[in-house]
Amino acid sequence: MSPTLQRSRTAGGTAFHEAGSGEPLVLVHGVGMRLDAWGPQIEALSRTHRVIALDMPGHGESAPLPASAPLQAFVDWLGQTLDELALDRVNLAGHSMGALIAGGSAARFGPRIARVALLNGVYRRSPEARAAVLARAAEIAAGGAVDFDGPLRRWFGEGAEHEPAYRLTRGWLSRVDPAGYATAYAAFAGGDATYADTWPEIGCPALFVTGDGDPNSTPAMSRAMAEAAPKGEAAIIEGHRHMVNLTAPDEVNRLLSDWLRR
């Protein structure tokens, strides 16, 4: 496993890692992960920007939210964290659950979000997909054993067990706080349509990235959000699935660098 990145904490209990200088770029990871998952992006993008990666509530070293917290509470958390870090205007990128938080923040905070990027974001799941993810959320909330192999198969595909990104991701999943994981997963399961109608009103440059093989955060979802956003752009990375920030870091870094220049 790669070394854990050093963290500071805000007054409200959010753990963060900061690198570089210049225009701020805030990064929010997905359910079960931690800010270290942005390692390749922190290294590359801190050469041109002040990069601030956050541990989501109940993950890494950040304080949790209440067990019933919906997606809106995670968006409130991000707004409070920006206040605590005295960040008036930021570029914001999120992965998976972090993408839902980023999209909600762009809707809620208006010009405070200069640009928004959603990596492997979900948008208006099908009834079948919604039922499946809600069932998984209910199982996790019931306190049963957390299934790591199911998510990893969806994220990486079969036969990827020996890949470095797979091993890193499994290590982070195995260390996640069960209560924090359950709260975030429930918000993730129920949040795919919460801010879906707001994209036509979000006027900042908006980038939507996913892998062509991601079965849950599909290319169709990224394209639909890009079509709805006035300044939206979709990028589909061929040959990859859910963890594109780790499995295709050079392409993701290039896309984010271009987006930061828009």
Image (cartoon, rainbow, N blue to C red):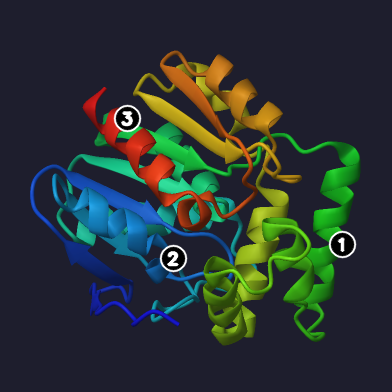
First reached walking from the N terminus: tag 3 or tag 1: 1
Camera-side residue of 30 and 214: 214
First reached walking from the N terminus: tag 3 or tag 2: 2
Q: Provide the residue designation for mark 2.
A: 37
Quarter of the figure with residue 86: bottom left
Q: In screen coordinates, is 257 left or right of 197?
A: left
Q: Residue at x 59, y 42 (%)?
A: 121
Camera-side residue of 155 and 198: 155
Q: x, y (%) of residue 36?
A: 38, 70
Q: How many marks?
A: 3
Q: Residue at x 52, y 23 (%)?
A: 199
Residue type at mark 3 is Trp
Q: Which mark is residue 135?
A: 1
First reached walking from the N terminus: tag 1 or tag 2: 2
Q: CA distance from mark 1 to mark 2?
A: 26 Å
Residue type at mark 2 is Ala
Q: Is residue 67 visible?
A: no
Q: Residues within 10 Å of mark 2 (few under 14, many from 20)?
A: many
Q: Which mark is residue 259?
A: 3
> Closer to us: mark 1 or mark 2?
2
Image quarter hosting the N terminus: bottom left
Q: x, y (%) of residue 207?
A: 44, 30
**Compared to 18, does 26 lie above or below?**
above
Q: State the residue lying farthest toward the left.
A: 21
Q: In screen coordinates, is 73 left or right of 231?
A: right
Q: CA distance from mark 3 to mark 1?
A: 36 Å
> Closer to us: mark 3 or mark 1?
3
Q: Residues within 10 Å of mark 3 (few under 14, many from 20)?
A: some
Q: CA distance from mark 3 to mark 2?
A: 20 Å
Q: Is residue 46 visible?
A: yes
